Image (cartoon, helix red, strand yellow):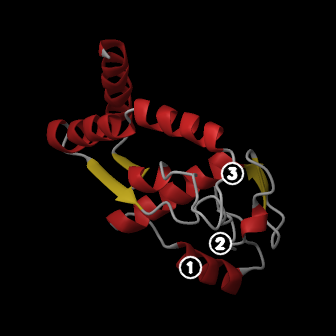
């Protein structure tokens, strides 16, 4: 719709005006909208809810927004833009790098089982996406390098803010 397109243009302009580099998850729509019907041996669960979620994902036009964002960032503003793998961004601790599916007990809460760092799960994932983007663009120190350097200098696993 025109309202949605107008909103996407406004948001993408605001973001590209504000940031020198932008990283987004390289989401695969096909994987996100798989059917939950199952097969003859194993029937799907919550089929009605899953089909509603699929409709919402498809109507959100995420790819239209990302395309606008990428175009404005790279072509109009000559700034940096990268798509990064979304794999495990919600399970990896952005402080110590420990990956465990049990780090994320609920949709909104993240608590690392190793270093006990607690944070909103979406913020944790976004910081992992940011780190991957910086690494991918060659603009940041890798988490592994940071951890090695921090541990050799002290026992702290905290990032400087």
Read off the residue under disc 1: 144
Q: Residue at x 74, y 79 (%)?
A: 154
Dot 2 falls on a residue whose secondary structure is loop
Q: Position of residue 98 (x, y in %)?
A: 70, 74
Taking the image as shown, residue 156 lies to the left or right of residue 25, namely right
Asked if residue 14 is positioned above or below residue 106 in the image, the reply reads: above
Horizontally, residue 88 falls left or right of residue 7, namely right
Q: CA distance from mark 2 to mark 1?
A: 8 Å
- Of labels 2 and 1, the one closer to you: 2
Q: Residue at x 37, y 66 (%)?
A: 136
The quarter of the displayed image where residue 91 is located = bottom right
> Image point 44% across, 63% down: which residue?
85
Query: Viewer-nearest of labels 3 and 2?
Result: 3
Q: Residues within 10 Å of mark 1 (few under 14, many from 20)?
A: few
Q: Which residue is mark 2?
A: 97
80 in relation to 6, above or below: below
Q: Is residue 18 visible in the rendered structure shown here? A: yes
Locate residue 14, reporting x and y percent.
Answer: 37, 26
Viewer-nearest of labels 1 and 3? 3
10 is higher (above) or lower (below) than 19: above
Dot 3: few (<14), some (14–19), or many (≥20) neighbours within 10 Å?
few
Earlier along the polypeptide chain: callout 2 or callout 1? Answer: 2
Taking 133 as reference, is 123 above or below it?
Answer: above
Q: Residues within 10 Å of mark 2 (few under 14, many from 20)?
A: some
Identify the element where label 3 is drawn.
loop
Spatial separation of the CA atoms under disc 1 and disc 3: 39 Å
Residue 54, position as x, y percentages in the image: 50, 40
Q: Quadrant of the N terminus?
A: top left
Q: Residue 45, labelled with which disc?
A: 3
Residue ranking furthest to the left:
75
Residue 135 in the image: x percent, y percent? 42, 67
In this view, which residue lies farthest toward the top? Answer: 3
């Amino acid at each position: 719709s025109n309202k949605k397109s107008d909103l996407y243009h406004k948001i993408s302009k605001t973001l590209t005006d504000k940031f020198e580099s932008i990283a987004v998850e390289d989401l695969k729509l096909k994987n996100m909208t798989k059917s939950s019907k199952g097969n003859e041996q194993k029937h799907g669960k919550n089929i009605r809810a899953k089909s509603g979620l699929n409709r919402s994902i498809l109507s959100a036009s995420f790819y239209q927004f990302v395309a606008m964002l990428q175009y404005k960032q790279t072509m109009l503003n000559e700034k940096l833009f990268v798509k990064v793998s979304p794999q495990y961004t919600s399970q990896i601790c952005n402080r110590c790098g420990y990956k465990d599916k049990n780090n994320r007990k609920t949709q909104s809460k993240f608590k690392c089982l190793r270093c006990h760092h607690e944070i909103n799960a979406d913020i944790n994932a976004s910081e992992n996406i940011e780190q991957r983007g910086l690494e991918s663009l060659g603009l940041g120190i890798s988490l592994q390098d940071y951890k090695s350097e921090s541990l050799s200098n002290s026992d702290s696993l905290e990032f400087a803010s």
